[in-house]
Image (spheres, coloured by chain):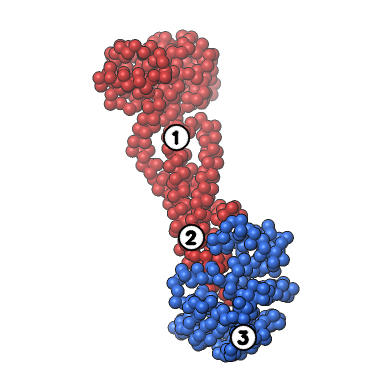
Amino acid sequence: MSLALSTLIYEWRRYMAAVIALAVAGLLVLALVGMFMGIGKNFSATIDRSPAHIMILPPDSEGLGTSQPRRNIPLLFQHSEVVEATPFNVTWGQFTNFPEGEQKAVREGVQIYVVDPIPGAVTLPTDFPEDVILALQEPYSVILDVTSLNKLGVKVGDKAKINGRTVTVRATISGYPSLFNSMIFTSRQSAKLLGLVREGPRVGAILVKVSDPARTDTVAAELNVIGKGQFKAWTKPELSKRNQESMFKNSFISILLGFMLVVGVFIGVVITWQTLQGAILANIKEFASLRALGVSIGSLNLIIMELSFWVGVAGLGMTAILLVGVTALAGAMGLTMFYPLWSVITIAIMLLIISVLSGLLSLGVLKKSQPADLLR
Amino acid sequence: MNGKLAIDAKGLSKAYKIGKQKQSVLKDVDFNAYHGQVTMVMGPSGSGKSTLIAALSGLMKPDEGEVIALGESLWKKKKSKIDRFRLDHCGFIFQGFNLFPALNATQQVEQVLKYCKVKKSEAKKRAVAALTEVGLEKRLKQTPSALSGGEKQRVAIARALSKNPQLLFADEPTSALDSVSGQVVIKLLHRAAKEHGAAVIVVTHDPRLEAYADRVIHMEDGKILSDHFVNQPQDVVETPVS
């Protein structure tokens, strides 16, 4: 084991401030990215968990909130491998509970997702269990995420109103939390009864199933040729990735993340640099004795740089531990966190750059390792 | 090699600026030392003895004078070459032991050998041999916190000796030790001179060490007051007097 690594392990308390500073810097940025990505994931949870292989969107759209002509649906069936094409129906509704006793009255806007409660249907999320599918088949039944029960002031079996019409909360699912408007699922038949199905000339995203999922990429490309620019066919991974990217094109999120990045780097560099300097000064006589024995200042610089690198690695480890804790805490509060690989790699590189930069800034202190000072 | 001139310095002067005043610490000092001999430099605090060995060993450039060490003019070399010279030929023992707290005794010695470009397996062998020579064969895996003061100084001596230095400088090596440990340390330095042929230059206050010296030089006010050979080296043509 090298001198740098042995020193870090042996004198870990001395380096703890730097390790924690790095971990906090990493956590600050990564937790924010994770939170925003988690929110984004929740928005597209029904798409990600849909059995659809391809999503059809308007040509200039990268998100799910836009509409396209209904006439695109028959166009899709020109491709012989398209077996199902159904519009994805999401609407807004006013949810009102029937408060009992001292219960608070809730009147809130909700997102209503229309699904076909038939196993294998392209609009039915793959993770809906059998009892939930059966519950959805009942007229006027709705289901919602378990974390939305409190927010909407209802429990399973309760009656409530959507746009003034009475519905029954028949079951709950998990994995569809939402920071803002709660997600409510209902069947196409119930949605029709509630007046929520859009029958007009425009539809939202169209979900497509193909006969051979292994050929999804090819079929998507061929559908784009058939569409002649009237729509764009996205495979699920493509759309998921584009959704994540478009999230960070949002200027508010970018500014916030950029600000946190700068604050994180600043805090990380200053604390790591000062801690490293203090630690080197504590061993300055030992370094000076190596200088006396003829070890060059360049070799001592390398020891410091290696030490700062290991501090960075320790900071990374600590970030991972803190992140697991924060994610667990967020999970307990019904908030999904998602960390794409690029963000983890970026933060890892950022922490190593901070630690190496701090190491470089600390090299000056080695000039104090004058071996002549060791002579009394 | 024993008895040959190892280091020869002429006209060494050094002054420090204290406030607006310049204070001379070394005043035109001539000095030499021989292989296989323990040369003891004694004198009160502020007499210039530490400055003298700093100038002799390449740690501090004198204002004037020349040092010929192992036949090479030390202060005419570039800084990096002086470092290399010390790495190849010099050993140092300080009053404070200056051992890395995280390394065990063997690693302390190996650490220095690594920079001497000694292979890992060879470095381990030499480290164990050096520590065995100073009587620490049972303390190879101990870190400084588990060693006594005397043992720490013996590790420092092993670290210095493992390089097989031809010049060994010791600055107050026994000041922080009890008398028994001090005896052990000075005997080791004596052995380094006699068995390894090193020129051992010891700066000390400790009069008990005189018994082990081949030559005793007394300094005061930056000048050599007396220079007395206990054992005359073979090469001495005339007794050097400052």
Badge 1 is on which residue? A340
**Can you give x and y, in whole percent of width and height, for residue A204 in the image?**
33, 19
The image quarter containing residue B3 is: bottom right
Residue at 47 percent of width and 15 percent of height = A142
Kind of residue sitting beneath label 2: Asn
Query: In the rendered view, does A67 fall on the left or right side of B17?
Result: left
Q: Nearer the viewer, residue A315 or B211?
A: B211
Q: Is residue A181 above or below residue B178?
A: above
**Can you give x and y, in whole percent of width and height, for residue A108 in the image?**
42, 24
Badge 3 is on which residue? B217
Q: Determine which of the numbered discs, if any, sits on residue A301 in the image.
A: 2
Kind of residue sitting beneath label 3: Ile
Q: Nearer the viewer, residue B151 or A252?
A: B151
State which chain disc 1 sits on. A
Query: Could you give the CA–CA distance between mark 3 and mark 1, rounded to whole angstroms?
Result: 73 Å
Kind of residue sitting beneath label 1: Pro
Give the chain ID for the blue colour: B
Mark 2, mark 3: which one is toward the viewer?
3
Q: Is residue B108 above or below residue A188?
A: below
**Can you give x and y, in whole percent of width and height, for residue A304 in the image?**
50, 58
Helix, strand or loop for disc 3:
strand
Query: What hue represents chain A?
Result: red
